[in-house]
Amino acid sequence: MSQDKLQKFKQILSDNKQSLTKARLKTFELLLGSEPQSMNQLISRASGDVDRVSIYRNIELFESLGIARKVYIGWKYKVELSDIFTDHHHHLVCLSCGSVTDIEDEQHIEDFITSVAGKHDFAVKGHLFEIEGYCQLCTRSKAM
Amino acid sequence: MSQDKLQKFKQILSDNKQSLTKARLKTFELLLGSEPQSMNQLISRASGDVDRVSIYRNIELFESLGIARKVYIGWKYKVELSDIFTDHHHHLVCLSCGSVTDIEDEQHIEDFITSVAGKHDFAVKGHLFEIEGYCQLCTRSKAM
DNA sequence: CTGCTTGCAAATCTTTTGCATTGAA
DNA sequence: TTCAATGCAAAAGATTTGCAAGCAG
């Protein structure tokens, strides 16, 4: 399973004539099986193994290769593996505790995008869709 | 027209027991009738009149009062007046020329959000929805 | 080997804080 | 008058750059 992903990762690198380095592997592993993470989280989790600068450079590379993507949460972004590695999905972002919940993409969104794009003669490459608010726990505890 | 907006702005402030200061008025004016702007744009446009720190503080205030909102375009956020001052809308963002086209919110999105939020017991405060791709012109000229 | 990558240091932003002063109500 | 809001300086954070040394191919 995760083997597949690793394989796919290596494949993408080689397809693009990019070398497979220790730092890149580690960066990729940090992204595996986790919620979207901030740069800071990645950097501190990599601390000792990979320098913060390399994290930045590799995340940027991953993005350009379509390996990872950024999601906008609050006024900050976080990084997660792209749809190639996980099912395409969107998030419920809690403005209070910052928790991120995946939601099922009910296809509505996709269909809607296709129709709108059609009207405007727009060649869709991707989309952003995030819902912000307060999660169950925060709503309860703070009685907002 | 713009008078209405100014009126509404003042109303919101007083309803929330916030004073109407010179800096807040200027900050609000900077947001009027423009495309979403980055913090830097706002800060430099306000230069001489309002300090960068006050811009930050007031934009934050505006956001909490629902006067302004942030949109994430091209992986950096920008600020624009909220739906109270302009119609609620989303964007088609061209990755090539950077043009931003408003799209009609066909209500699909809203309904979908309501249903998903219900399932997760999530108190929605807002949402992000942007479509990225290539506009008609860029598609033609570059034959992508 | 050879060039692409890294790590480190330092330069650049971008945002936040502390505090004395100013100004709105 | 009185307390919230502002400006300034400076701290803290986040991101980028320059460059010599190290590693993948």
Image: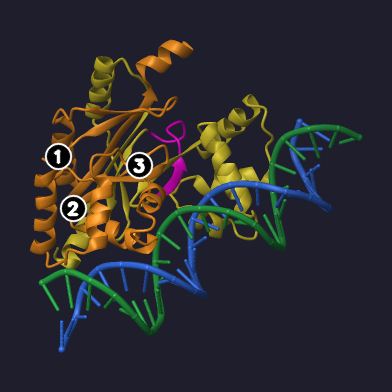
Chain colours: A yellow, B orange, C green, D blue
Observer-side mark, 3 or 1, equals 3
The residue where tag 1 is placed is B115
Q: Which residues are magenta?
A: A76-87
Is residue D12 placed above or below B6 in the rendered structure?
below
Q: Nearer the viewer, residue A69 or B36?
A: B36
Q: Nearer the viewer, residue C6 or A117?
A: A117
- Residue A79: say if magenta: yes
Q: Residues within 10 Å of mark 1 (few under 14, many from 20)?
A: few
Q: Residue at x 8, y 57 (%)?
A: B11
Q: Residues within 10 Å of mark 3 (few under 14, many from 20)?
A: many
Discs 1, 2: same chain: yes
Asked if residue B117 shows in the view, the reply is: yes
Q: CA distance from mark 3 to mark 1?
A: 24 Å
Image position, residue C12 (x, y; %): 58, 54
Secondary structure under the numbered disc 3 in the rendered image: strand
Of the numbered discs 3 and 1, the one sitting upstream in the chain is 3
For disc 2, the chain is B
Give the position of the N terminus of chain B as an image quadrant: top left
The residue where tag 3 is placed is B72
Q: CA distance from mark 1 to mark 2?
A: 23 Å
The residue where tag 2 is placed is B66
Is residue B72 placed above or below C2 in the rendered structure?
below
Q: Residue at x 9, y 45 (%)?
A: B4
Image position, residue A10 (x, y; %): 61, 33
